[in-house]
Image: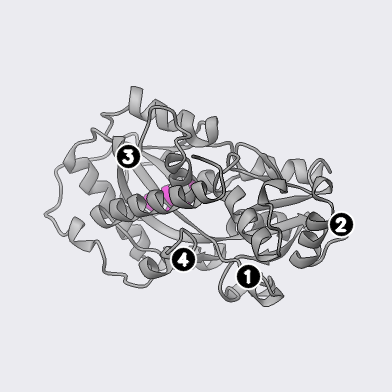
Amino acid sequence: MTAFTSLARWAAPLSIGLAAVSLPAAAFQPGNTECIAPAGAGGGWDMTCRMVGKALQDQKLIPGTMQVLNKAGGGGGAAFAEVVNKRNTENNLIIAASSSTSTRLAQGAYPGNNMDQVRWVASVGADYGMIAVAADSPFNTLPELLAKVKADPSSIAFAGGSAVGGWDHIKVLSAARKAGISNVRSVKYVAFDGGGEAVTQLLAGKIQAFTGDISEAKGFVDAGKIKVLAVLAPERLSGEFAKFPTAREQGLDAVGANWRGFYAPGKMSNEAYQYWVKSIGTVYDSKEWKETMARQGMAPLNLRGDAFQKFVKESVDEIQALSKEIGIIK
């Protein structure tokens, strides 16, 4: 089982992990809540904080508005280190996380830090990956783009919002392999702190292709700035996303999904932790969140408390094995 296929077995059973929250109402009462987005505005982590924060507010699960703090740096490492070293006992703090987080932890990209230093709260769905180009690009299909990479690797550079060897990078390498590019180290990848910055460089003509998640690409597509060559999903998504072809239907069996969720400070009180597990679970269960997921092209992934902790641990182990295989780590 690989990091690209394990998500499927977790996405289906919606009851898994619910025992972690079947407790009496906790005494903890939130106040001055905050969500750290470990990158700049406009990317997936920022979107996760803002959408879930608004849902928590709308459902009156928190008092007032949740403050979103954008803390870019080190592909999420700056935020992780700050939480562990300076904010490890705070009860009103949650931090957006994703497959990019588990990828960096798997590869030791957060020096001195590991996944056991924080508490993993819950997932809120999963985004399928995609590969896009500028709207005026001559490439119209993913096979066309990768054929150019195969013929002249130096002519195409991919931009992503994760570090070299991170989730966005690994998605491109997986697609490249499926296209018959045996030396995946020849594929050029440029890392940025968040998908928003990566798209800015694409539109400036400094990069030829963008890899990220379909939800963070939607606004740029709607604005006519980029075109999605392929979604890395097993079949076409529904609703507004049904117009985007999959890599699989273009003859490339590349599938990659990015889970989205939250972690919390490692020394958060048990009462506060159970409150956040239950509250984010309440958001996930709501009709409004299901509608948000449909609008954003997110797939189901409902894991909470201990079940989410176990899932992240398995993700870290699997990504570490894949990273060793392609030579990113020893």
Residue at x 71% of width, y 51% of height? 210
Mark 1 or mark 2: whose residue is earlier in sequence? 2
Q: Dot 4 surroundings within 10 Å: few (below 14), some, or many (20 or more)?
A: few
Instruction: Quote the CA–CA distance across marks 1 and 3.
Output: 32 Å
SS under mark 1: helix
Judging depth in this view, the residue of 277 and 213 nearest the camera is: 213
Mark 2, secondary structure of its residue: loop
Q: Secondary structure at mark 4?
A: loop
Q: Earlier in the sequence, mark 2 or mark 3?
A: 2
Is 223 above or below relative to 253? above
Mark identifier at residue 264: 3
Secondary structure under the numbered disc 3 in the rendered image: strand
Residue 162 is situated, as x and y percent measured from the top left of the image, at: 58, 42
Q: Residue at x 82, y 41 (%)?
A: 204
Relative to the observer, which residue lies in front, 132 or 280?
132
Which residue in the structure is indicated by mark 2? Answer: 136
The residue singled out by tag 4 in the image is 5
Q: Disc 4 marks which amino acid?
A: Thr
Three-letter residue code for mark 2: Asp
Towards the viewer: 249 or 82: 249
